[in-house]
Image: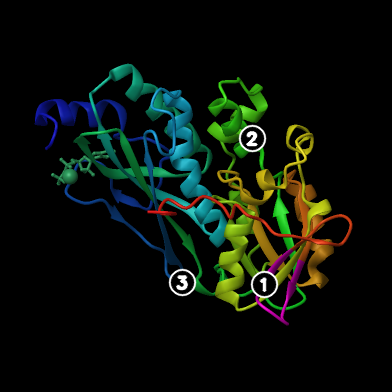
């Protein structure tokens, strides 16, 4: 059932019309039956959609400004992993009630990140029901330049950006009733999508994916799509101080919500990649090698023996 029409349009007009960056390629935005967008010749549309459900993806009482940020950040991360430039978003909001303060904070969090990445909110849908947020993000990438999952080759070096496991540790702390410090908490609630990195990896990376479900699960998708295996050196994994102090590999290997990029590239590109990390101020770490002799993902402990990860990342339908 729809919210009462007058109130629904007032809500959209007050909080979502005109949100984000001004773009000349938006011929028609919020307010008509469809948005009209101009796609430049030679570019393909990169389209990604994510849903956040209260109680599943976020605590229902979480800070609405951070939630607005995260709603867009998770989709920006998908476009980053494709090497695409973000452009236009649509937003489906299902709300239990119309709370102007909550909506203003949510829209501000979303709008700030949208402006930072040149994204315009061009439409959406607003309904009443249990709090659920779906954002579709569209971006542009020449089809031949897109960073797909199926291009990893034997001998490629495997890289990750940033540090791993921070978001999972912050979540574990919150679930245990403790308060993670602000920096750790921000890694869970306000992730930084690696958009500039993804764009710069065009022509360098052979394959890429963003880490939303955990390194083993997400790298596993690259391996399956590319028909290869891999060896990871666990002592090479980039860990923040708090995660390193835990000596729990599952945080870095199976923890979700990091939104870092994992990509593969020929070892001949190492110098370029390190220079790129310096230029972007983004830590880039080689963590292993793609193997062509079998399709397993082997995780080598510092003593050279193999770890068998038991938790393989978050799966909504595991055991269902
Ligand atoms: P329709 O009945 O044609 O589906 P709606 O009444 O759902 O149109 O929406 C009216 C206009 O407001 C449309 O342009 C739609 O894209 C936009 N809109 C609705 N909800 C949102 C939202 N949450 N964020 C941004 N735009 C929205
Ligand atoms: Mg509608």
Q: Position of residue 51 (x, y in %)?
A: 37, 46
Please provide the residue range marked out in magenta.
289-298
Q: In what quadrant does ligand 2 lie?
A: top left
- Tag 3 or tag 1, which sits nearer the N-term? 3
In the rendered image, the residue lying farthest to the right is 303
- Answer above or below: position of 106 versus 292: above
Asked whether residue 6 appears in the rendered view, the answer is: yes
Name which of mark 3 and mark 2 comes first in the sequence: 3
Residue picked out by circle 3: 42
Q: Viewer-nearest of labels 3 and 2?
A: 2
Q: Residues within 10 Å of mark 3 (few under 14, many from 20)?
A: few
> Residue 148: image x %, image y %?
55, 69
Q: Residues within 10 Å of mark 1 (few under 14, many from 20)?
A: some
Quadrant into which the N terminus falls: top left
In reply to whether residue 36 is colored magenta, the answer given is no
* Residue drawn at (23%, 23%) of the image: 98
Callout 2: SS = helix
Crowd tier of the residue under label 2, counting other residues whose Cα lies within 10 Å: few below 14, some 14–19, many 20 or above: many
Q: Is residue 3 above or below residue 192?
A: above
- Residue at image location 43% in from the left, 29% down from the top: 59
Q: CA distance from mark 1 to mark 3?
A: 38 Å
Would you say residue 291 sits in the magenta stretch? Answer: yes
- Mark 2 = which residue? 169
Give SS at disc 1: loop
Which residue is identified by label 1?
296
Looking at the image, the residue that sits furthest to the bottom is 293
Residue 83 is drawn in which quadrant? bottom right
Residue 42 x %, y %:
46, 71
* CB under 8 Å between discs 3 and 2: no
């Amino acid at each position: 059932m729809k919210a009462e029409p007058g109130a629904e349009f007032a809500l959209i007009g007050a909080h979502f019309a005109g949100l984000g960056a001004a773009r000349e390629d938006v011929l028609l935005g919020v307010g008509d039956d469809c948005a009209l967008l101009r796609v430049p010749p030679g570019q393909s549309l990169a389209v990604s959609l994510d849903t956040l459900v209260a109680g599943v993806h976020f605590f229902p009482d979480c800070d609405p400004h951070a939630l607005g940020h995260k709603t867009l950040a998770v989709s920006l991360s998908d476009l980053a992993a494709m090497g695409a430039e973000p452009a236009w978003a649509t937003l489906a909001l299902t709300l239990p009630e119309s709370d102007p303060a909550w909506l203003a904070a949510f829209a501000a969090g979303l709008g700030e990140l949208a402006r930072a990445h040149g994204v315009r909110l061009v439409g959406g849908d607003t309904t009443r029901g249990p709090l659920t947020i779906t954002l579709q993000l569209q971006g542009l990438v020449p089809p031949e330049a897109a960073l797909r999952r199926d291009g990893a080759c034997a001998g490629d070096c495997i890289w990750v950006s940033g540090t791993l496991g921070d978001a999972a540790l912050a979540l574990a702390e919150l679930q245990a009733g403790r308060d993670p410090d602000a920096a750790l908490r921000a890694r869970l609630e306000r992730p930084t999508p690696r958009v500039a990195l993804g764009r710069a990896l065009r022509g360098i990376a052979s394959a890429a994916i963003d880490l939303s479900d955990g390194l083993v699960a997400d790298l596993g998708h690259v391996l399956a799509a590319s028909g290869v295996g891999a060896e990871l050196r666990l002592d090479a994994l980039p860990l923040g101080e708090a995660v390193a102090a835990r000596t729990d590999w599952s945080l870095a290997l199976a923890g979700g919500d990091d939104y870092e990029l994992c990509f593969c590239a020929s070892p001949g590109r190492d110098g370029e990649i390190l220079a790129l990390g310096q230029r972007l101020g983004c830590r880039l770490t080689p963590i292993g090698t793609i193997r062509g002799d079998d399709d397993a993902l082997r995780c080598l402990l510092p003593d050279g023996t193999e770890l068998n990860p038991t938790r393989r990342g978050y799966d909504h339908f595991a055991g269902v």
